[in-house]
Image (cartoon, grey):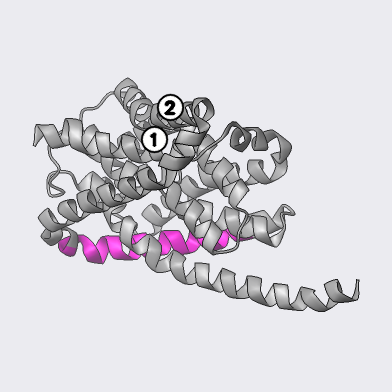
Amino acid sequence: MDFAINVVVPAAQAFIMFSLGLGLEIADFKRVFTRRTAFAIGAFAQIALLPLAAFCVVMVLDMPPVLGAGLMLLSFCPGGVSSNVITKLSHGDLALSVSMTAVTSVIAFITVPPLATWSILYLMGSEAPDFSFFDIAIFTFLVTTLPVLTGVFVRAVVNKLARRLERPLQNIAIVLWVLLLLALFASNRQVIIDNMPTLGYATMLLPAVLVVMGLLVARLFGLNKTESKTVSIETSVQNSPLGITLAIVITGTSTNFAEVPLALPSAMYSITMYVVVLPVMFLFRWLSRDEAVEATPADASA
């Protein structure tokens, strides 16, 4: 079990983030400066408004302290490669999505530790596990920031090879984490079922609120429809594997969710997130089709 906690789970997360980095280029980071407004609004929604929405859900539903802390921990995790895929399928702004994912993943070791420490201590109080702020920072850097930067470096140095390996490695990373997630679910199914009444509402409500909030905030600050869809998706699609990994490492006891209830919200969100977001994705695609049809006569007359 120690091997799973200390090696298997972190290694799987690091590999996923490396595969993400391998698909990134320096231009994805430069875009932050060329599209400052869109990126700033998206980053604000993801880094500030998302945790605020999660905290409101915790308070409104009066969640048990450990589950509330787990939901907050999830809200601090940057979006993963899933958000880029869903953005593309939604006919959103893929370049903006990739840039947001790239930057928030790289700075995760700065944003996650203080927020995670505060939320766990605030919500759990004396029941909080014994953990170190610096250990969270180092761990987040090793499994998130460093693998992403390594992938970017490899892409920059051996671009042709990286392009050939990008898709296979991303597929391997997805399969690897799905298998690991299925193993965790299989060994913890009863605990998940027992907590479904409490967590089901929270992990369904949160992504629904985030989809609407991301869309409204983006439109309020003048982003176009395509950019607004992207902010909405990036805000609601969280890196639940990282949330599970951090919870297991912070608790440092087991991969059994009965002993690590801090990981339960992230595990549940990895399912309910798609239940909410996938219908939204199809709605966005439908709206994009209608917009294209409406634009055709004007384009033809021009």
Q: Looking at the picture, which amino acid does disc 1 mark?
A: Phe
Query: Against 125, is 261 above or below?
Result: below
Quarter holding the N terminus is top left
Q: Which mark is residue 150?
A: 2
Q: Position of residue 108 (x, y in %)?
A: 44, 33
Residue placed most toward the observer, 138 or 127: 138
Segment colored magenta: 193-215
Residue 211 included in the magenta stretch of the image: yes
Residue type marked 2 = Thr
Q: Residue furthest left?
A: 1
Q: Nearer the viewer, residue 175 or 119?
A: 175
Q: Quadrant of residue 117?
A: top left
Q: Is residue 194 left or right of residue 296?
A: left
| Chief SS of the magenta region | helix
Q: Is residue 18 above or below residue 297?
A: above
Residue drawn at point x = 12 percent, y = 39 percent: 254
Q: Is residue 20 magenta?
A: no
Mark 1–mark 2 Cα distance, whole angstroms, equals 7 Å
The one of 63 and 275 positioned closer to us in this rendering = 275
Work out whether residue 230 can be spotted: yes
Q: Residues within 10 Å of mark 1 (few under 14, many from 20)?
A: many
Q: Residue at x 36, y 30 (%)?
A: 140
Q: For the residue labelled by badge 2, is the local secondary structure a helix, a strand or a loop?
A: helix
User: What residue does disc 1 label?
Assistant: 18
> Residue 118, image x and y in percent?
38, 33
For the residues bearing labels 1 and 2, Cβ distance under 8 angstroms: yes
Q: Left or right: 257 with respect to 39? A: left
User: For this view, does 228 lie left or right of residue 109?
Assistant: right
- Percent across and percent down for residue 27 are 63, 35
Could you say where residue 226 lies in the image, as x and y percent from the top left? 66, 59
